[in-house]
Image (tube, rainbow, N blue to C red):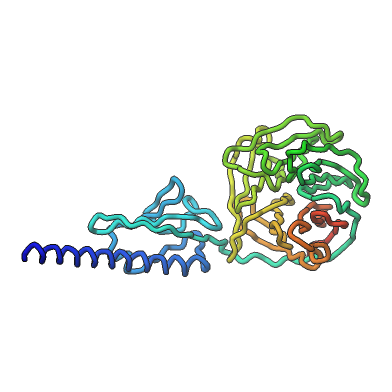
Amino acid sequence: MKKSFLIGLLALTFLASCNKDKEILNSLNEYNTSMESKGYHFGDALVLPKEVTENAESVSISFGDKETSELVVDPKFFTLGDNPVTFNIKKKSGEILTQDATINVFAKNPEANLTYEMVQEYPHNPKNFVQGFQLEGNTVYESDGQNGSSQILKYTLGSTVPIASTLQPQDVFSEGSTIVGDKIYQLTWQNKKGFVYDKSSLKLLNEFAYPNIIGEGWGLTYDGKNLILSDGTKNIYFLDVNDPSKMVRYISVAGNSTAYDQLNELEYHRGFIYANVWQKPIILKIDPANGEVVGKFDFSEIAKQHTTGNDDVLNGIAFKGDNMLVTGKNWPKIYEVTIK
C-alpha cells in the first residue's frame, strides 16, 4: 500500500513538473512570437515573462558558436535582420530547458522614401540577362548571366553594339561585376570563384576563389579599398581587393521595420551602397558602416513596363555623375534618373 502511494506521489510530482515546463516554454514561445514581427533595436533589453524568470536560476542565449547571459541586444553578439538563436533555461532544480527562436533586429531610424525624376532613356539589348552593371565615362561594362550565354562585355551608352566581349564556359552562370582601376572583377553564381579581366580588351587575366563563408556570388562593387560582395542573404561582405579570397568584414542589412535578404546587384556611390533586392522593384541605400538601410527607391512604375515574370526584373545600378542609371534583366531600355 505504501509502495503504491509513493508511486502515485512520484507520478503526480512528475506530471506537475512536466506541466510547469510546458508553462515555461509556452510563455517563452508566446513572447518570442509577439516580438518577432515587432523586433528589437540595438541596446534593447529582452523582458522575458515571469513564468520564465521566476522558475529559472539562469537564462542564456546561444547563437552559432557564441553564447551570452546578458539579455540585451548587443551588436557584439547580434546582427541586423534575423538571428536564429536558442534560449537555454536552467531551472532551479538544475534541469535545462531549451527553445529555438528568431530575434529580429531592426535599424533605429526609419529609412527615407527617396524620389526621382526621369531624365533620359537609352537602348539596351533585351537579350542581356543583366547581373552586373557599371558606367565609366560613357562606357557601360556589363556582366550577363545564364548558363551557355554568360559573358562580360562593354558598349557605349546609347548603343547596344559591344566594343568588346568575353564569353564564359557553358557551366558558368555569371553574376555581379565591378571596375577596379584597369581591371574588371566578375563573380560566378555557384562556381565559388570569380574572374579578373583587363578592362580595355576584356581578356581574362586570372581567377580567384571565394572565402569559405561565401556559398554563392550575386552582386559586386568596389569602395576604393575593398571589393563588396552580396551572396543572396542579408549579408554583404568586404573582401581584400589584393586577395579576394580573404574576407575583411561583413555587415547585415535591415531597415527600421524590415529585414532584407536576397540582396543582388550592388553599386557604391559617395559613401553608400546601393542594392537591388531580387524580384522586387526597389533599390536600397545602405550605410556600409553598419548595414542600416537609410533610404529606399520605389521603381514600380518603371519595372511594371518590362516585368512579366520572375526573371525580367529590375537589376542594374550605375551612376552618371549624381544621376542614377537603372535597367533590368532582358529589358530593352536603360533609364537615367535624377535623385530629388
Residue farthest along the top direction in this orientation: 205
- Give the x, y percent position of residue 274: 71, 54
- Give the x, y percent position of residue 99: 39, 58
Out of 287 and 282, give the one closest to the viewer: 282
- Give the x, y percent position of residue 309: 76, 61
Out of 30 and 316, give the one closest to the viewer: 30
Left or right side of 211 for 54: left
- Give the x, y percent position of residue 191: 67, 38
Q: Going 30% across and 64% down the picture, which residue do you hit? A: 21
Judge whether 208 appears above or below 115 on screen. Answer: above
Left or right side of 108 for 244: right
Left or right side of 223 for 159: right
Q: Residue 227 is drawn in which quadrant?
A: top right
Residue 252 can be seen, yes or no = yes
Q: Going 85% across and 58% down the picture, which residue do you hit? A: 336
Out of 273 and 340, give the one closest to the viewer: 273
Q: Residue 147 is drawn in which quadrant?
A: top right
Location of the C terminus by quadrant is bottom right
Q: Going 91% across and 49% down the picture, which residue do you hit? A: 160
